[in-house]
Amino acid sequence: MKADKTIAKAWIKAQGRASRSSTSVVVILGLLSTLLGLLQAWALARTLASILTSHPGNAPPAIGLFLIVSVARTGLSVIQDVMASTSSLTARRRLRSEILARIIGEGPALLRRQHSSVIASTLVDRVDALDGYFARWLPASALWLVSQWIVVAAVFCQNHKGGIILAICCATLPVFQAVFGIATAVASRKQFLAMTRLQTRFLDRVKGIATIVLSGGTERETQALAKSADDLRIRTMKVLRIAFIASATTDVAMVAALVLIVITQSHRLTSSTPELTLTRALYAILLVPEAFASFRALSAAYQDRAHATAAAEAMHALAPIPEERGAVEVTTTDATHSLSITAENLFFAWNQERGPVIHDVSFTLPAGETLILEGPSGSGKSTLIELLLGFIEPSEGSIFFGSQNMASMTPRQISSQISWIGQKPVLFAGTIRENILFAKPDASEAELAAAISAAAVDRYLPLLPEGLETRIGEGGFGLSGGQAQRIAIARAFLKNSPILLLDEPTSHLDPATEAEILESLHRLAQGRTVILCTHSAQAQQFHGRHLVLNRGRAISYTEEAA
Ligand SMILES: Nc1ncnc2c1ncn2[C@@H]1O[C@H](COP(=O)(O)OP(=O)(O)OP(=O)(O)O)[C@@H](O)[C@H]1O
């Protein structure tokens, strides 16, 4: 757990380093703004002193300088904001694709460990929560110390007493921040947990709305949802309360500095004081807010840092942040060539206490041949398929694609060799064309047409309102199980990988549709190395070797077609 936190923190720091160049620009702009602030305060002090000492003739040049600097500072601040937002947007885009790649690398096994709403909220909310970290925290943390002490030094040069008071008040601030910072981190972690709980509950109940209504549980579920929402409200208020108190401590230090400087300078704040002396006293007073401005920005962004740490931990828990993997170069295989598959003494346990669900399983499947995986429900067929997909790793034993040990291949290299068709294909919200092209977005029209024809998608396309451009998936046109499975087959034709894994691809279909789908699958299997996991008698028309599993053990292995 502690190691996970360390990895998450190191990862967050690495994200900061990756954004260093864009953050540096924002920091330089911030420093320029502080220097302009010094000039602005001097021009204002000069204007006031010349009026108070009855030398109004000196005021116009100072007023002119003040106006010019104010306009320049406003412009600089706008550019700084735009640069900070752009830097945050770029960093979040980079992060989202990195996390997406890790989630995809984890594969369907992830959905068994994590609720889909947790995955969605990690990709959307958690990454969005990093906006403040990139846009505010990174520049503020680099800027505050330098900026604050430039102001203190400037005051000290003009007014020693004022400079010393300001230095003492500024030096006490980090102590307050440390105390409130820890409290903020804890509170915002709890707030995130409450938000995830609410999202998970809400998504679950929306999915099961029919069951809730029919079982008369509407009132109970409404109350439970309200309770989760209330929990989130309480935790959010707590975060805000701590942030409010933290910012109040900055105000207290600032007011203390202001009062002490005014008291020590009071004898100079009269019309009989020489103009330059009065300017220096006013300068020290006017720069007090400026000295605290950078710290205020840091304090406001402290919550963003706490959010970022909580988000990094959640992302690590979802899909572990990889520690540098000694990537082994794999000779890319020509997709048109088949690959043999060899499993050597595989063991795998989902849960150590329940023991292995794959127990010393070995087989050799020559290139271009078919292995039919059989066994009663729960015997380990799907688990073996997941091992072959690289979604989980064997605790003992090895898998070879050709002569290549899978353990030395990256997830991308493994997935490039395999097409997988499961029981229910996933259709994304989009057109049929987009759904098929998902397997190969850069496919030509001719390749797409060939895949559609080979998978017999064209048999039902004329029946759809807009043919290939019909929108399907959530909020779109519904497809039958057989029609959806044809889209999965078309994707596999398009991907054209040497290995084909089929996990009960016809289990939800009626006998007539099953026969049609099997015919398409037969075409797809030609020239590929196929592992078919099935209960169905019809699937026996696939000829090949048979491996029968029972409670994770291979109880029979026949080399010839049954
Ligand atoms: N994510 C998981 N966590 C814990 N145990 C699991 C998980 N997935 C599967 N199992 C267990 O592993 C064993 C093998 O399951 P698996 O799904 O591989 O069997 P199967 O032969 O494919 O079954 P079916 O034909 O019903 O799909 C079962 O005892 C199951 O309870």
Image (tube, grey):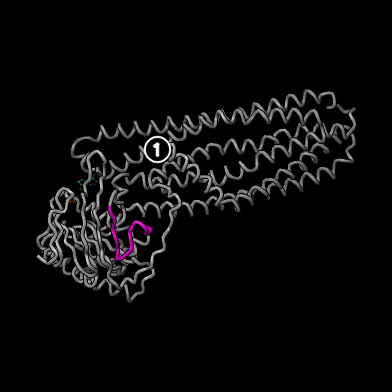
Tell me, yes or no, whether the highlighted magenta stretch contains residue 263.
Answer: no
In which image quadrant can residue 368 be found? bottom left
Where residue 252 appears, x then y in whole percent?
64, 26
Mark 1 surroundings: few (<14), some (14-19) or many (≥20) residues within 10 A:
many
Q: Quadrant of the N terminus?
A: top left
Give the residue drawn at x 88%, y 35%: 276
Q: As displayed, is residue 124 above or below residue 547? A: above
- Which residue has dot 1 on it? 195
Give the residue drawn at x 61%, y 41%: 141
Q: For the residue labelled by badge 1, is the local secondary structure a helix, a strand or a loop?
A: helix
Where residue 376 appears, x then y in whole percent?
12, 51
In which image quadrant can residue 217 be found? top left
Query: In the image, is 269 to the left or to the right of 514?
Result: right
Q: Nearer the viewer, residue 432 or 364?
A: 364
Q: Which residues are magenta?
A: 397-410
Q: As displayed, is residue 4 above or below residue 429? A: above
Mark 1: which amino acid?
Met
Query: In the image, is 28 to the left or to the right of 522?
Result: right
Residue 456: tell me if it is visible.
no
Q: Quadrant of the C terminus?
A: bottom left
